[in-house]
């Protein structure tokens, strides 16, 4: 059995550890029984923890129920192991030969557990816990002696620790720490490749290049008076979403699940997270809280208790998925979606266009967005099928999403063929909204696509996007905060425009009761209105669209909203890039 095998392995490891002590001048008989038991118990916990940790990769990646008890057991063993080595450090040093890098490995595994628990639950507080353990490893120099040992595999453990730590810091917007870590990682890689002459030098240098590009992806810098960069967070804060006025009639649906899919060619990425995916996942999260104050161990909740209401919608992050993978995760989300809840699908992907003309105009006749194929090597933005009698296989067509419109569905498509999803049909009468990016941008902005889409930037950080299209690359903190205050006022007014509209489709209002969706909708309208007023956005394909269509005169072309945008431009002294009398131009 599993327990018998663990004890057998434990006895072998204990025996090996004690023989090591004897070979260095000690005698096994001289070791007191209590100390011998301490080493045995430590070996058992260490083996058990490794066994459970390795088993995590066998858990299904989708579905929210099957993995929780296993995670709970793994956390439990690692908690005991961590406390045990703290309480018996001296005995383990003397009798087991415990090295500092081994303590670092235990701490690193606990950090990984918290990070993966964040990925499974979308609870940002677990990121803080992962940061605490990763930070302790660095502060206590657990890996400092690794470089003195002639074992390249130990150095690789250290390099991987740095890469994981950087990911957590990026997600927590700790950019100052990221820059320090990147410098340290660079030095470590240089030392590693110089000492061992390994073949993975190119891969590690690529890691450095990716994180450097990721850090520099934001097009605008906010500066303090001493010219240091201000780190801005784009997660939902208490004052983030416009409040609902008393008497506003909106739906009671709540965003419960989201699929965030990234499949753009040549976009900045780090650790299977494109910059668009990174921005969207932050738009669907609240600011992290201190975990210790609100809960005990993850996954250890008694089955008799009702689970606490999750603050953030659950998310799946899918980097370049195949059609099969995407559909599997989509079906799992759909299956587990609670009553009165919404499923959000965010697609940031290369456009797939129909080949030839079709006599019909069905949900498979307009193309869609690219899904990954392990066989095909695809270059360029538009994929054209050679055999015109068939539809593109490696593509998510609008028709592929029809079965999932049986439940409330909120779709965001950021693609050069986003308009394919404008031809939706609401077959089942459930709330359904599609927010669609422009299919092309003015030539002056097109070379920025590697650093992320402008449309997604508007949904994540509308002020930064507004500054970017206004030609600004830096700004003082005081002016930034003044503009953020004014933008909050604009959002409140957009919310009123939507809820007071007499001709708006009811789907928009049914989603408007959820804070995350409310903020996305108001930012979408702000984005659309800004682009329609901008002097260089003059083609129809430069503007976002939606299904169902919004009443333009009451939303994106509302004179009251246009006045607000001109006022914001005046605060920034960029009014000259916007049209004054936009209604006359249509």
Image (tube, helix red, strand yellow):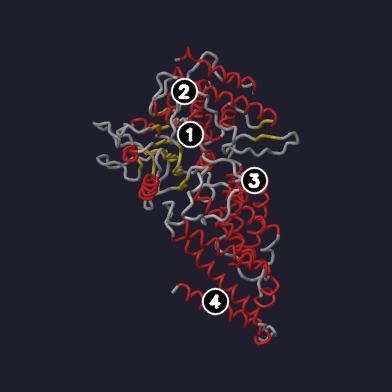
Point out the tag, 2 or 4, that comes first from the N-terminus.
4
Q: Secondary structure at mark 2?
A: helix
Residue under label 2, please give it: 499
**In the image, which disc is placed on residue 66?**
none
Q: Nearer the viewer, residue 409 or 466?
A: 409
Residue under label 4, please give it: 10
Q: Secondary structure at mark 1?
A: loop
Which numbered disc, 1 or 4, marks the residue closer to the eye? 1
Q: Are marks 1 and 2 in contact (CB under 8 Å)?
A: no
Residue under label 3, please give it: 174
- Crowdedness of circle 4 by 10 Å Cα count: few (<14), some, many (20+)? many
Q: Are marks 3 and 2 in contact (CB under 8 Å)?
A: no
- Crowdedness of circle 2 by 10 Å Cα count: few (<14), some, many (20+)? many
- Crowdedness of circle 3 by 10 Å Cα count: few (<14), some, many (20+)? some
Point out the tag, 3 or 2, that comes first from the N-terminus.
3
Which quadrant of the structure image shows residue 579? top right
Point out the tag, 3 or 1, that comes first from the N-terminus.
3
**Residue 63, x across and y down, in percent:** 41, 51
In this rendering, the answer to whether 530 lies above or below 314 is: above
**Residue 167, x across and y down, in percent:** 58, 50
**Residue 93, x across and y down, in percent:** 69, 73
Point out the tag, 1 or 4, that comes first from the N-terminus.
4
């Amino acid at each position: 059995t599993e327990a018998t095998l663990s004890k057998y392995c434990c006895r072998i490891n204990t025996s090996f550890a004690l023989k090591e002590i004897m070979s260095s001048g000690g005698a096994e008989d001289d070791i007191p029984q209590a100390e011998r038991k301490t080493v045995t118990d430590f070996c058992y916990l260490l083996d058990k923890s490794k066994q459970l940790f390795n088993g995590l990769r066998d858990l299904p990646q989708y579905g929210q129920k099957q993995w929780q008890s296993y995670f709970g057991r793994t956390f439990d063993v690692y908690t005991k192991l961590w406390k045990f080595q703290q309480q018996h450090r001296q005995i383990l040093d003397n009798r087991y030969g415990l090295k500092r890098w081994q303590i670092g490995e235990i701490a690193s595994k606990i950090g990984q557990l918290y990070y993966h628990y964040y990925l499974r639950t979308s609870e940002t507080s677990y990121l803080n816990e992962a940061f605490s353990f990763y930070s302790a490893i660095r502060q206590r120099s657990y890996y400092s002696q690794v470089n003195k040992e002639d074992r390249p595999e130990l150095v690789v453990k250290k390099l991987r620790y740095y890469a994981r730590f950087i990911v957590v810091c990026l997600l927590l917007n700790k950019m100052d720490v990221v820059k320090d870590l990147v410098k340290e990682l660079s030095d470590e890689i240089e030392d590693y490749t110089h000492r061992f002459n390994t073949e993975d030098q190119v891969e590690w240098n690529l890691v450095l290049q990716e994180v450097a590009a990721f850090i520099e992806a934001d097009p605008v810098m906010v500066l303090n008076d001493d010219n240091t960069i201000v780190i801005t967070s784009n997660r939902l804060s208490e004052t983030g979403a416009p409040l609902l006025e008393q008497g506003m009639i909106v739906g009671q649906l709540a965003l419960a699940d989201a699929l965030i899919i990234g499949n753009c060619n040549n976009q900045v990425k780090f650790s299977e997270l494109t910059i668009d995916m990174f921005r969207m996942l932050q738009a669907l999260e609240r600011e992290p809280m201190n975990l210790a104050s609100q809960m005990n161990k993850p996954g250890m909740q008694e089955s008799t208790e009702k689970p606490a209401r999750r603050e953030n919608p659950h998310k799946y992050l899918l980097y370049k998925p195949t059609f099969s993978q995407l559909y599997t995760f989509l079906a799992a989300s759909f299956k587990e979606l609670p009553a009165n809840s919404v499923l959000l699908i965010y697609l940031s992907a290369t456009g797939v266009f129909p080949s030839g003309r079709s006599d019909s105009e069905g949900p498979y006749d307009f193309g869609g967005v690219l899904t990954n194929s392990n066989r095909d090597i695809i270059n360029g933005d538009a994929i054209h099928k050679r055999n015109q009698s068939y539809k593109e296989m490696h593509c998510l067509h609008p028709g592929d999403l029809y079965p999932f419109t049986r439940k409330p569905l909120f779709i965001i498509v950021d693609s050069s063929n986003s308009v394919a999803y404008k031809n939706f049909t609401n077959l089942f009468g459930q709330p359904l909204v599609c927010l669609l990016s422009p299919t092309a941008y003015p030539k002056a902005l097109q070379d920025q696509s590697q650093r992320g889409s402008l449309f997604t930037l508007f949904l994540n950080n509308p002020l930064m996007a507004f500054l970017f299209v206004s030609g600004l690359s830096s700004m003082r903190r005081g002016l930034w905060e003044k503009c953020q205050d004014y933008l909050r006022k604009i959002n409140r007014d957009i919310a009123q425009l939507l809820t007071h509209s007499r001709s708006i489709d009811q789907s928009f209002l049914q989603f408007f009761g959820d804070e995350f969706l409310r903020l996305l909708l108001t930012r979408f309208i702000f984005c659309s209105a800004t682009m329609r007023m901008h002097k260089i956005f003059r083609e129809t394909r430069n503007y976002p669209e939606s299904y169902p269509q919004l009443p333009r005169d009451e939303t994106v072309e509302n004179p009251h909203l246009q006045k607000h945008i001109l006022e914001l431009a005046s605060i920034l002294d960029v009014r000259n890039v916007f049209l004054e009398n936009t209604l006359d131009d249509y």
